[in-house]
C-alpha cells in the first residue's frame, strides 16, 4: 500500500511537467507528423494525400540544397567550436588573478541574444565599411563580397556561429577539466613529459565522455540553425545558405502547412538519428539517476 | 624551466585571444551605437552622439520600450513557472521511486533536442484555434514547456546532492512529501534554484523563432523579434537604432553573466559532470 501512496504522490509532483510537455511539445510534434500527410495550404480546402508531400521532396532541388547545407554547416562550425572551445577551457582552467572576470567576459557572446549577435556580424560583413573587409585591407588583402558569394556567405555564417557558441563549448569542457585531479599531472611531470604530451596522453582521454557530450549538444543545436541565417544571409545568395529550419519556415510563412511540416519532419528525423548515433557510439550512459 | 616559459607565453597568448575574440565584435556594436552614421569609419565628419539611444527610448513608433516590456513579462513569467514546475518534478524523480521514472526523465531530456521548427508550425495552428495569436500566453506556455528539460536536469543534480537522511528525519516528524520539499529541501537548494532561474531567464529572453511566428505587432513582440525586424524608411537599415537597441537588451544578460558567472557555469555543468 505504501508503494501505491508514493506513486500517487510522485504523480502529483510530475503532473504539471507532464501536462505542459504533452500540450506544447508532444501534441505539436504529433500534429506536425499528421499535417505532413495533408495538403494544407491557407485558403485552399484541406485534403488527405498520404505520402505525396514526401514524394514531392524527392524532386525538390531546393530541399536537397537545404539538406546539404544543414549537414555541412554543423560539420565545419562544430569542429572549429570544439578546437577554440578547448583553447578557451585550457586557459580558463589555469589559476590566475582575473580568472573570474575573464570567465565572465568569455560568456558574453553566448549570453547575449543570438539575434543581437547576428546583427553585429551582419554589419561586420558589410562590403563597403564592414570590419571584416577593413581588417583584410590592413594586410593588403582584397575585400571579399562576404554575403554576395556562396563561399563567402557560408564562411560568414560559420564564423558568426563559432563566435557565438565557443563559450558554451568552453564551459562544458572546463567542467570536464576540473574533474581531472592535479596529482595525475604531478606524476607525469616527474616522468619528464611536457604539457602538450600530457594534454594528449592524459587529459584528453580522461575528459573524452564530456567532449562527446559537448559534441552532441552543439551538433544538435547547429543542425536546427535559424536565427543567424534569418538575419545575416536570409538563406541567400541563391538559397545556398538556407537551412532546413529556414526552408520549412518559409512554407509556414506562405501558409503551406502541409509541405512545411514535411520539411520539419525530415529535420526532426535527421537530428533524431544523429543524437542516437552519438549516444550509441559515444556510449553516453544515463548517469542521471 | 624552459617549459615553464613556453607555457607562460602560450597562456598569455590564450588570454589575449579570448579577449580579442569575445570583445571586438561587442565593442564594435557599442561604437556604432554611439555614432551618427554606421559608416563613420570611411565617412569623415560623422560625430559621436547619444541620439540613437534617446530616439529608441523616446520615439513611440519604434516601439522599443514595448518590446522590452513584453520581453520582461514573458521571460519572467516563463522562467518562474518553468523553475517551479521543474523543481517539483525533479524532487519526485530524485526522491520517490515510481514505475516509468527513468523513461520519463529520458523522454523529457531528449525533447530538448527537438528542432523548434518541427513544433512551431502546429503550435501556430493550435494557438490560432484558441484565438491566442499575439497574446502573452501564446509565448509563455511554449517557453515553459521548451525550457522544462533544462530546469528538470539542473534541479535534479541539485537535489541529488542533498542527503536523503534529511527527508527521512522530516517524514518521521510527520511531514508530507510536499512539506518536506517546501520547508526543508527547497530552502537548502535556494542558491541552486536561483541560478536555474537565471539560466531560464536568459533562455526565454533570447528565444526567437517562436516569438517570430506567434506574435504580430508591438503588443506582444519581444526584443529579439523587434531587433530582427527593424526596417529603415528608405531601404538602408537604421544601424544606429539597431545597435542602441541591441546594447540595451544586452545589459541585463551581461550583468547576469558577469555577476553570476560562477553560478551559471555550475548550473550548466552540474548535470553534465557526475560529481
Image: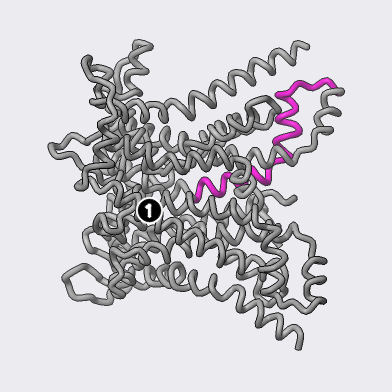
Measured as percent of width and height from the top left, residue B54 is found at: 27, 36
What residue do we see at 61% from left, 43% from top? B265
Please identify the residue farthest to the bottom as the structure is shown. A1
Q: Main secondary structure of the magenta part?
A: helix
Residue under pointer 1: B71
Regarding residue A61, the answer to whether it shows in the image is: yes
Instruction: Locate residue B43 relative to residue A10 in the image: left or right.
Output: left
Instruction: Locate residue A110 relative to residue B32 in the image: left or right.
Output: right
Measured as percent of width and height from the top left, residue A52 is found at: 29, 68
What residue do we see at 27% from left, 58% from top? B219
Chain containing mark 1? B
Instruction: Locate residue B93 relative to residue B260 in the image: left or right.
Output: right
Residues drawn in magenta = A191-220
Query: Is residue A214 on the magenta stretch?
Result: yes
Q: Nearer the viewer, residue B160 or B169?
A: B169
Q: Is residue A84 above or below residue A116?
A: above
Regarding residue A148, the answer to whether it shows in the image is: no
The quadrant of the picture occupied by the C terminus of chain A is: bottom right
Q: Is residue B56 above or below residue B199?
A: above
The quadrant of the picture occupied by the N terminus of chain A is: bottom right
Q: Quadrant of residue A175?
A: top right
Amino acid at each position: 500500500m505504501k508503494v501505491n501512496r508514493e506513486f500517487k504522490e510522485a504523480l502529483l509532483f510530475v503532473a504539471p511537467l507532464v501536462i505542459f510537455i504533452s500540450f506544447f511539445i508532444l501534441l505539436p510534434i504529433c500534429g506536425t507528423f499528421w499535417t505532413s500527410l495533408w495538403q494544407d495550404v491557407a485558403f485552399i480546402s484541406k485534403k488527405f494525400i498520404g505520402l505525396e508531400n514526401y514524394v514531392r521532396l524527392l524532386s525538390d532541388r531546393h530541399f536537397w540544397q537545404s539538406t546539404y547545407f544543414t549537414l555541412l554547416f554543423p560539420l565545419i562550425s562544430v569542429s572549429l567550436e570544439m578546437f577554440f572551445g578547448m583553447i578557451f577551457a585550457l586557459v580558463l582552467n589555469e589559476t590566475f588573478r582575473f580568472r573570474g572576470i575573464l570567465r565572465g567576459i568569455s560568456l558574453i557572446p553566448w549570453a547575449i541574444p543570438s539575434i543581437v549577435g547576428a546583427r553585429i556580424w551582419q554589419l561586420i560583413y558589410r562590403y563597403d565599411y564592414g570590419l571584416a573587409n577593413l581588417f583584410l585591407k590592413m594586410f593588403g588583402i582584397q575585400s571579399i563580397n562576404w554575403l554576395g558569394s556562396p563561399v563567402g556567405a557560408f564562411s560568414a555564417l560559420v564564423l558568426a556561429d563559432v563566435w557565438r557558441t565557443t563559450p558554451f563549448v568552453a564551459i562544458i569542457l572546463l567542467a570536464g577539466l576540473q574533474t581531472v585531479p592535479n596529482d595525475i599531472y604531478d606524476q607525469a611531470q616527474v616522468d619528464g613529459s611536457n604539457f602538450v604530451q600530457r594534454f594528449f596522453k592524459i587529459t584528453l582521454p580522461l575528459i573524452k565522455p564530456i567532449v562527446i557530450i559537448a559534441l552532441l549538444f552543439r551538433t544538435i543545436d547547429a543542425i536546427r540553425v535559424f536565427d543567424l541565417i534569418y538575419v545575416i544571409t536570409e538563406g541567400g545568395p541563391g538559397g545556398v545558405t538556407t537551412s532546413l529550419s529556414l526552408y520549412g519556415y518559409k512554407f509556414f510563412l506562405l501558409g503551406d502547412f502541409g509541405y512545411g511540416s514535411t520539411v520539419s519532419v525530415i529535420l526532426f528525423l535527421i537530428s533524431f538519428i544523429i543524437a542516437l548515433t552519438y549516444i550509441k557510439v559515444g556510449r553516453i550512459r544515463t548517469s542521471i539517476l | 624551466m624552459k617549459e615553464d616559459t613556453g607555457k607562460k607565453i602560450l597562456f598569455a597568448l590564450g588570454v589575449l585571444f579570448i579577449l580579442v575574440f569575445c570583445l571586438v565584435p561587442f565593442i564594435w556594436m557599442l561604437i556604432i551605437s554611439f555614432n551618427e552614421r554606421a559608416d563613420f569609419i570611411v565617412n569623415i565628419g560623422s560625430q559621436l552622439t547619444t541620439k540613437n539611444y534617446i530616439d529608441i527610448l523616446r520615439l513611440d513608433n519604434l516601439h522599443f520600450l514595448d518590446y522590452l516590456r513584453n520581453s520582461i513579462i514573458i521571460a519572467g513569467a516563463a522562467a518562474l513557472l518553468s523553475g517551479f514546475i521543474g523543481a517539483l518534478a525533479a524532487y519526485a524523480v530524485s526522491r520517490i521511486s515510481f514505475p516509468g521514472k527513468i523513461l520519463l526523465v529520458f523522454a523529457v531530456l531528449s525533447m530538448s533536442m527537438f528542432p523548434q521548427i518541427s513544433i512551431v508550425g502546429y503550435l501556430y495552428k493550435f494557438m490560432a484555434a484558441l484565438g491566442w495569436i499575439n497574446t502573452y500566453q501564446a509565448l509563455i506556455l511554449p517557453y515553459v514547456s521548451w525550457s522544462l528539460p533544462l530546469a528538470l536536469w539542473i534541479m535534479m543534480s541539485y537535489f541529488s546532492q542533498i542527503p536523503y537522511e534529511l527527508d527521512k528525519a522530516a517524514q518521521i516528524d510527520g511531514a508530507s512529501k510536499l512539506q518536506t520539499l517546501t520547508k526543508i529541501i527547497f530552502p537548502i537548494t535556494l542558491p541552486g534554484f536561483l541560478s536555474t532561474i537565471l539560466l531560464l531567464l536568459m533562455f526565454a529572453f533570447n528565444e526567437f523563432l517562436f516569438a517570430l511566428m506567434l506574435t504580430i505587432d508591438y503588443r506582444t513582440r519581444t526584443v529579439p523579434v523587434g531587433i530582427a525586424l527593424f526596417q529603415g524608411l528608405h531601404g538602408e537599415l537604421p544601424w544606429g537604432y539597431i545597435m542602441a537597441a541591441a546594447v540595451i537588451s544586452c545589459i541585463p544578460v551581461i550583468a547576469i553573466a558577469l555577476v553570476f558567472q560562477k553560478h551559471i557555469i555550475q548550473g550548466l555543468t552540474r548535470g553534465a559532470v557526475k560529481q
